[in-house]
Image (cartoon, rainbow, N blue to C red):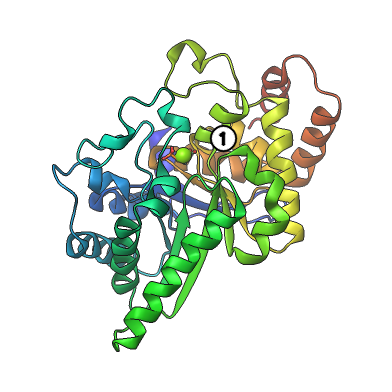
Amino acid sequence: RKAAFAALRDLPPETKDGSRITLMVNAGLRDDVAALDLTGADGIGLFRTEFQFLVSATLPQRERQQRLYREVMEAAGERPVVFRTVDIGGDKALPYLTVEAHGEENPAMGWRALRLALERDGLMKAQARALLEAAAGRTLNVMFPMVSEAWEFTEARALFEAQREWLAARGKRLPVEIRYGAMLEVPALAEQLDLLLPTCDFLSIGTNDLTQFLFAADRANPKLAERYDWLSVSILRFIARVAGVARAAGVPVGVCGEMGGRPLEAMALIAIGIDRLSITPAAVGPVKAMIRSIDRGEAAEFVADLLARPPRDLRGALTEWATARGI
Ligand code: PEP
Ligand code: MG
């Protein structure tokens, strides 16, 4: 099977009825970029910038951040890289930064990600400058984690724009274009899409955190890992609705959580209107094989019916349907 996946490397992730899915990889370290050539992926859909912070004993200086971002973009070449601003706190605690957050009873729901970055704006400004300067002459794709309300996205974007103007005033070379995205991983944001979408260039659904918050089930607790299935009515209906609203507004929407790296889950996502997936590199082969073996129209119809009248065992029904079609 490994050889079969390797043979798929240069074939497009396209369904039998001609729907081209954008298949990207998640990354966080300089060396992860090699996965692009190995897998033939379309780009990096989630670059977790906090990795550099997590592996450092002290706060990485702006120059070091900039060097990493430039190296990653250079190695990616023509393929896009979506940089996510730091998601620190929660399960990614930093001893030298988040002392104020220590002792939080619920760190995943605590002072983390954009909440922390907007308040500690020195950190965010340094990262904005590092990204803007690293992307000089290119397109910069940047997205913000844990956006809970539209105003947080507006503030984060304004912070980047202010840094861009600051650099422009000093005659620095700038990105030719900046595309700003929001991660949708806090359910509350789904009720503010009308406020968010007009100001946002793309949406990326983070199903790891989204599942944890939608089900109120700690993503790090093994006792709950099997209990709430990604192939559940609530998650699929939720994502289908968000994808529909974003599509109507003309805003591209993808999924960047681990859910998209499982073939059956990815099939369900594609069936409900997701056409961009960013997944772990090892999953590209299996997911691409699935994509090339499905008829999207047929899958869409089947999953829509399932979600309208859900059986008790949604996973079982999907598995049976896929197996019968040799998927
Ligand atoms: C997610 O929450 O789904 C996500 C992609 O981000 P992370 O796993 O880094 O929290
Ligand atoms: Mg997340």
Q: Quadrant of residue 327?
A: top right
Toward the viewer: 325 or 59?
59
Disc 1 C-beta below 8 A from ligand 1: yes
Toward the viewer: 98 or 70?
98
Toward the viewer: 144 or 141?
144
Toward the viewer: 218 or 134?
218
| Residue 208 vertical position relative to residue 279 in the rendered view, above or below | above
Determine the residue located farthest toward the top in the rendered image: 223
Q: Residue at x 62, y 29 (%)?
A: 214
Q: Residue at x 43, y 32 (%)?
A: 1
| Residue 149 vertical position relative to residue 155 in the rendered view, above or below | above
| Residue 254 vertical position relative to residue 73 in the rendered view, above or below | above
Q: Residue at x 63, y 51 (%)?
A: 275
Residue 294 seen in render: yes
Q: Residue at x 69, y 53 (%)?
A: 193
Can you identify the residue that label 1 sits on? 210
Q: Position of residue 149 (x, y in %)?
A: 60, 49
Q: Quadrant of residue 110?
A: top left
Q: Amino acid at mark 1?
A: Leu
Taking the image as shown, residue 303 lies to the left or right of residue 118, namely right
Q: Position of residue 133 (x, y in %)?
A: 29, 73
